Amino acid sequence: MAEISDGKRYSANDLVRADSGGCEGCFSCCEGMGTSVILDPCDVYEMTKGLSMSFEELLSMALELNVADGVILPNLRMEGDRESCIFLDEQGRCRIHSFRPGFCRLFPLGRIYENGSFSYFLQVHECRKKNRSKIKVCKWIGVPELPRYESFVLQWHDFLGELQEQVGNEPDGERTKVICMKVLKVFYLSPYDRERSFYDQFEERIKCFTC
C-alpha cells in the first residue's frame, strides 16, 4: 500500500486529491486495460438501462466474458492497436459517462477490504493528470444512494469471495462450471426491471441464489 498510495484511508465524506478537471485531452486510463474493467451486476443494470439493450446484445458488441479469480464475469472490451475502450469516441471522450461502470467512477481511487468493511485509498501512480484538485469521495464517485451502493459493493465482494473459496480446489471441475453459469444467469442474463430499484432486485436474487 505504501508504494501505490499516499498512505491514507478515506471514507465517503473525506476530501481526496482525485479531481482531474474533466480529464480534458487525456484518456490514458481508458486504454490498455486488458480484461481488468470487470462489471458487477449494478454496472450491467445501468448499462442495459442507459443503452436500452439486453445483456446479450452488450456481449455481442461491447463486453466479453473472462475468468476472474476462478469465476466467469463480464468485462469491458478493448479494441484496436491502442487497446482502447470500445465506448471511447473519436475525441477520446466516454460515450457512456453518465452510466459508466463503478471501476471507472472510482479511478484513481481504489478500495481496501478489511474487518467486514472497506475504505478508499488514492492510487498515486495511476492517473497522469498533474495538480489534481481535492474533492469529496462521494461526489467523485457520483452515484445516487451512495450508502446503498456501498452496501451492495461490500455484499458482492463478500459473495464473490465465498464463491472463489468454493471453486478454488477444482477450477476446471464440473461443479465450478455449474456455479459460474448460475452466477451469469441469476445476476446478468436474467433481465432486470428497469423501472424498479436495482438494489431491491439484487437483494431478491442473492437470497434466491443462496437458498
Image (cartoon, rainbow, N blue to C red):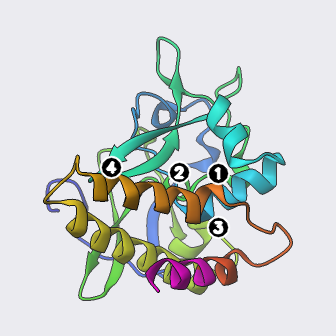
Q: Which residue is mark 4?
A: 68
Q: Is residue 208 magenta?
A: yes
Q: Which residue is mark 3?
A: 142
Q: Nearer the viewer, mark 3 or mark 4?
A: 4
Secondary structure of residue under mark 2: helix
Mark 3 or mark 4: whose residue is earlier in sequence: 4
Q: 10 Å neighbourhood of mark 1: few (<14), some, or many (≥20)? A: some
Q: Magenta residues, as a range?
A: 203-211
Q: Nearer the viewer, mark 2 or mark 4?
A: 4
Q: Which residue is mark 2?
A: 104
| Position of 110 relative to 11 (above/below) | above
The answer to which quarter of the image holds residue 136 is bottom right
Residue 87 can be seen in this image: no
Report how far apart the C-alphas of labels 2 and 3 lie in the structure: 11 Å
Mark 2 or mark 3: whose residue is earlier in sequence: 2
Residue 31, position in %: x, y? 47, 29
2 and 4 marks in contact (CB < 8 Å): no
1 and 2 marks in contact (CB < 8 Å): yes
2 and 3 marks in contact (CB < 8 Å): no
Left or right of 57, for residue 159 = left
Mark 3 or mark 1: whose residue is earlier in sequence: 1
